Image (cartoon, rainbow, N blue to C red):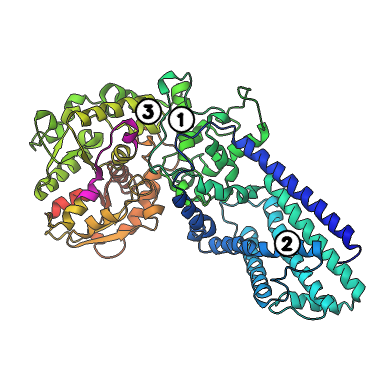
Amino acid sequence: MPGSGIVFAVAEVVIFLAAVGLFAYNAWKKVLLIRQGKPEWEPRWDRVPERAAAVALEVFGHSRLLRDPFSGPMHLGIFWGFTVLFLSVINFFWEGLSGSALPFTDGRLWYHLSMNLFYAIVLVALAMAFFRRLVTRPKRLELTCEALLILGLIAGVIVTDVMLDGARIARHGAAAPGAFLGAPMASVWLAMKAGPRCLDLAYAASWWLHAAILLGFLNFLPFSKHLHIMFAPFNVFLRSLAPKGALQPIPGIEEREFWGAHVLPELSWKMLMDGLTCTECGRCEERCPANQTGKPLSPKKLHLDIKRLLVQEGLKVPGAEREPIVSDEWTKTDEVWACTTCRACETECPVGNEHIEKIVEYRRHLVLTQGSIARQPQIALENMEKHSNPWGLSSSTRMDWAKTLDLPVFGKGAKAEWCWFVGCAGAFDDRNQRVARDLAAVLKAAGVSFAVLGTEEGCCGDSARRLGNEYLFKAMAEANVEVFKKYGIRKVFTACPHGFNTLKNEYPQFGIDLEEVAHHSQLISRLLAEGRLKPVKDAARRAVYHDSCYLGRHNDLYAQPRTVLAAVPGLTLAEMPRSRDRSFCCGAGGGLMWAEEHGERVNHNRCKEALAACAEGAGAQDACVAAACPFCLTMLSDGINDLTQGKGPKAVDIASLVAASL
């Protein structure tokens, strides 16, 4: 150890403890900022094995990051490089304190070879990162001095460690086994023809420089965009394990004087934690249908607004005046209303951030507290309140679509295994009424025991809840639950993914525990597997399948609709480039089916992709776009007609394709 060993050791201990103490202090201040949020509606510390598995897969395995073939391995290399090299950090401070390496590492081949190997991995990954930031420059990434500084600090940690390793080897006159980077560095020191005294100085300078970068980087973290390094494992561990499609209710909604979130403490602590955890990677933006069609919404900005306002306001006593988060300065109302709740952002986020809950909390405040909502969705809400359907048609006409079908009705004494929840689209929309009649034909052909609720069925409430009117949703949900209980209904199916998601994932919040809730793609797939349905007519056409957001990303149903299509003779199933959990939204979710859209229409963006897929391969001359959602069917039909002046392929529900082949 150069100089006085005692002075060196004392200085190291004092500096190390001061740096670690300062880091702990600033990290705790961030925790205190998070604790200003309100309690969560669900437990976040339960099901520990499941949570731990998610951390292993997504944090240590980088499963979401690896969806990108370039940046995924790059981040994985840096992450695991530093994870493994943490042993070298321990060894580094121990050597500075004691004058010798840890006994189980000193001169050991496994140690020097593994450390040097991971030095190289990190350096290659850093070269990729610099290339990506400075040359390819993806649109979702912002080139900032801070980002380059962080990359430089990471490089500095590695380079100074190699310098230190080389000085150590040069001082002792023998290369450590496996030190394929340290040995060349030792040659550099020796080439300078430095004597023992100079080599001691080189070692000391390298040691202190390495320590300064390590401890400086540590204390830079709580103030940098790399704050996610601290919070990401906890954020992934503490994420919601409720059904993905379920929104939280408002506890004690009748007793409240205000609803939703207007200032930061009205968000939950997990929502505030999301803001501090955001990596600013922009993966959410890249998949967001609103953002990609020129709308003002940026899912990334949604969290950065929380982070920046949280840091700006700091700690305040409860009840102190706060700056509104939904405002012209931070998250604007246009951003709040642009979200289709498609869940693409949450599917892509590598650190477990939850975007939709925040959007809905903001909408609840705007709708219930401020009474602020655009005219078109307001009309839909009024129609739901008066007539229990967004079209505003009399609820007494809910069964007019089935006048000639003689369907069994629970209210008329029918007993059945399944309740068919027809839904508002199937009951009132001309296009989807045809789908409902086709589905009825399929069910009868398979001998399914089913009945409908008739005029006692009400709107499921999906659009009301996602537009922020929790009061209205609660009323409609409770009304339907009472009807289910009245007839002892235990099994329900529906052709609408929005209704399916609401009945399956959200109605349990209102005191009903149904034995099974199925989407019609699941039921038809099951009937085909059991041999109760046997399509025989050759379709001789190409079907390009579109994944509904609420069937796919919200409920992980990807195989069943494809199984149904594959069972139709002569039907060639084709995929769009954006499919399954990376499917692009049709634009109708989140209640936006009832809202006016400005700029490029989301359904036009999707339909251009669908039309291109229809034009390729076998069966293109009579291609169709297949869907399993009434909202998607409407948006795809309208979009294709807009783009082709009514001369393009048809959008068809999977039930209609099966019915035509029976």
In the image, which disc is placed on residue 157?
Answer: 2
- Name the image quarter holding residue 497: top left
Residue type, mark 1 in image: Arg
In the image, which disc is placed on residue 376?
Answer: 3
In the image, which disc is placed on residue 301?
Answer: none
Label 3 secondary element: helix
Residue type, mark 2 in image: Val
Q: Is residue 370 visible?
A: no
> In the image, what residue occupies the spot 67% across and 34% down?
312
As drawn, the residue found furthest toward the front would be 103
Query: How far across and down, in percent of the image, does residue 145 sit?
Result: 71, 51
Q: Mark 1 = which residue?
A: 363
Residue range corresponding to the magenta coloring: 506-523
Tag 3: Cα neighbours inside 10 Å, few (<14), some, or many (≥20)? few
Closer to the N terminus: mark 3 or mark 2? 2
* C-alpha span from label 3 to label 2: 57 Å
- Residue 32 vs residue 49, the one in the foreground: 49
Closer to the N terminus: mark 1 or mark 3? 1
Label 1 secondary element: helix
